[in-house]
Amino acid sequence: MPVPASAVKLSVVIVNYNVCYFLEQTLLSVRRAVEKLGAPAEVWVVDNNSVDGSVAMVRERFPEVRLIANRDNPGFSKANNQAIRESRGEHVLLLNPDTVVEEDTFRLCCAFMDAHPDCGGLGVKMLDGQGKFLPESKRGLPTPWVAFYKVFGLAALFPKSRTFGRYHLGFLDNDQTHEIEVLSGAFMLMRRAALNQVGLLDEDYFMYGEDIDLSYRLTQGGWKNYYFPGTRIIHYKGESTKRTSVNYVFVFYRAMVIFARKHFAPQRAGWFALLINGAIWFRAGVAVVRRFWDQAWPVLLDALIIFAGMYFLKHYWEVNHKFVRTAYPPQYMLVAVPAYIAIWLGSAWLSGAYDDPPKTARLVRGVAVGTILISAVSNFLDAWRFSKALIVLGGGWAIVAMVARRLLTHFLRYRDLNLSERRQKNIAIVGSPAESRRVRALLEQAAVQARIIGYVSPGPVPAGEADDQLGEVRQLDEILRIYAIDELIFCGKDLSANRIISLMVDEQERFPHVAFKILPEDSQYIIGSSSKDSPGDYYALDIELNLYKPQQRRNKRILDVLLSLGLLAAAPLLIWPIDRKAGFFGNALNVLLGRRTWVGLRHTTTPERAPRAVLSPADHVAANTPLTEATRRRLEVLYAKDYEPATDFALVLRNLRRLGQE
């Protein structure tokens, strides 16, 4: 018999976009929490046109879930509103797909709402993938001054201050219930009566800011928002997940501008918008500089060390071996040596010397090629032909200096001198013998480089199954210390979410270096995240894609640039058969700038910062009927698995007519 609308206690709404592995774990924890609720509940998943198999997974593993499969990505607010309008629960929970809720979370939260009839919205204590408290669990309203303190770092410098720390309310006890102003969209429980009064999420916000807006409207409508630490959830991607992304900076802070224009007086909104727009460019600049520095510092350090060595080599050669004992002209150190260094480092980079893990052979090959190139070119430049001996000695010094710098960096990090190898992680599994064997099989098939020390049993183990048992959970502290464990994998089939979260919280305080991962029940993914600043990772039975190896990424980028230059040079002849001529020139420019790539994955999930593709490997396939999305994705996976630059070149030549498409 269908449950009457009035009898549904809770409607859980989850909006998903290409995080199938996280969504599966979230729904498993939600299923257990619904069972413990003790009242009828419904679960909604709104999928925003994912291409990673999320829809099929939900249909297969969670038939009880009400699924809305969108054909496009309308954004977070619109997707949530789709389900809210169709849901029937007395309370509505907006839940992120990268969370894990404790078994009693729904029961305790609904009980709190029932006991506090003035509560319009409720948030809970959120922890990152390491069991550390997430400050966005409780937030204050981003008034102009509060926003100013956050944007320019004063909130981070003085998190406990009642003046500067109002954005995350750092002066409030994390373990006490508080009335707060802003709830987190990762877990936002609301009373339907309150939503009926103040309205749903504002669809002007595509992503970020909609939770602030709705929280504010709840308080303006006479309701109260509460922070309730009586239950906990894991939220893998905290607010800072993409803080180094320029796109994140623009989207997040412009959402604050929308909020100001909507809710502040016109004169205050204008001042606030000016402040935030200034902050956008400031934060965007910081993000760009930080990203550049992260990638450039090894190269700049190598250049500095080589330059210093070349200075001493020059002085040594002038004093001891130069036929005419005169000093080299100033332009030698000011122009020639920097040019040599640029060629050595550029050649080393192209050879893969900066790829991880570092390989000495790549470095030697790259510098040797650079030395030959410098020697050859200098033969044609009489005014810049200083000393072949210094070029050869400089090349040798570059190799010695770069290898020594890598050895030192590697030793400081790993305490060994094996450049091409990383110390294998010591992994312990917390679970039953059967689940422990399943974890071992998954790690082996995923080719994870680690040593599995053994398993930790949740309770007593039957005789004959304790061969590699390290002990029981009650001895976990001692096990972590004795065996120098780097990573714990919890088996969700054998431990409740409550127990896993409690163990994470306890152990991260004593052993902050230990990473945690979870194998959900009957899942093929082992999921974890090292902090709120990392997007989360997982071990899975995925195909190793040649396309994303550093050497091939570099080759692909070089080919893109050469193809763009060649196509633009030949444009007077090639432009006529191209369908969208203006689009062709725009695409060529964007490829040169690194915003697009000529051939890539258009129908398959790509890494966050991967450039959009103009052509797909599926474009040239001749078929009597249009290819299905599944077929297109399969063709793209095959392309990525066996990628060769020649494939891109051939696809571009075969699809000249389509080079102007969006």
Image (spheres, rainbow, N blue to C red):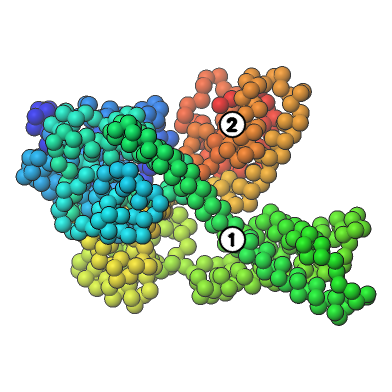
Residue 407's place in the image compared with 339, above or below, is: below
Residue furthest to the front: 267
Amino acid identity at mark 1 = Trp
Residue 417's place in the image compared with 636, above or below, is: below
- Residue 614 is marked as 2
Q: Does the rendering let one see residue 497? A: no
**First along the sequence among labels 2 and 1:** 1
Q: Which residue sits at x=52%, y=20%? A: 625
Total residue callouts: 2
- Counting other residues with Cα less than 10 Å from the Cα at mark 2, is it few (<14), some (14-19), or many (20 or more)? many
Q: Secondary structure at mark 1?
A: helix
**Left of 52 or right of it: where is 122?**
left
**Left of 60 or right of it: where is 282?**
right
- The residue carrying mark 1 is 297
Look at discs 2 and 1 and give the one toward the viewer.
Answer: 1
Quadrant assignment, res 581: top right
